[in-house]
Amino acid sequence: MSLLHSSIILAIFMAPAVAFLTYVGVMYFTGNMWVYFDGKFIRSAQLSEKKFVRVMAKYQPKVVISLRKSEVVENEFERRWCESFGISYFNIPLGSNTVPSDKQLQILNSLFGIYRDHGIYVHCLGGADRTSLASAIYHLSQQGKSVEEAEKQISFWFGHMAWKKPNMRKALGYFASKNWN
């Protein structure tokens, strides 16, 4: 086999790995942050303190919703920062692979309804599972999207791996069946 053929074969096998690593790198450096509806709804992974402050200054949401399972150091910084600038802060601890309780879904949806026109920033650790579910619920209940349209928020595009965490889509279906919107 010639050097050219070996190089081509190597390139063919390495291309998917390079593409995947590029994708992961972009997600990491952007914080998996997505802005919708002229900045009225922002979703992301856990941001660094510096990036969090920049996002708050730029979009000026009126509520920060953390979906992290436990209160961690990053959340404490966010909570104190929000308090000092008059921004409401809520922690709704969701599991990354469990269907949330009725109460958790109702609270989340109620907050979306209250702050819809005033700016919402929602995050979990990676922005892929819990934040995807929250974003789908927002699109469904507050923007009138269909379940199929809302479900697009729970996709590989945002880092969600359906085969690994199937309960996020199940939770959206459960939410839609309750008709809380």
Image (cartoon, rainbow, N blue to C red):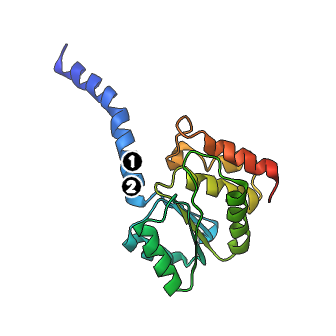
**Residue 64 falls in which quadrant of the image?**
bottom right
- Which residue is at 43% across, 65% downward? 72
Quarter location, residue 9: top left
Residue 113 image point, x, y percent: 74, 69
Residue 28 badge = 2
Quadrant for the C terminus, please. bottom right
Residue at mark 1: 24
Amino acid type at mark 1: Val
Question: Does the image show residue 57?
Answer: no
Question: Residue placed farthest to the left in the image?
Answer: 3
Whole-percent x, y for residue 73 in the image: 40, 68
Q: CA distance from mark 2 to mark 1?
A: 6 Å
Q: Amino acid at mark 2?
A: Tyr
Q: x, y (%) of residue 47?
A: 43, 65
Would you say the residues marked 2 and 1 are in contact, meaning their CB atoms lie under 8 Å apart? yes
Disc number placed over residue 48 in the picture, else none: none
Left or right: 126 as drawn, with respect to 135: left
Query: Mark 1 falls on what kind of element?
Result: helix
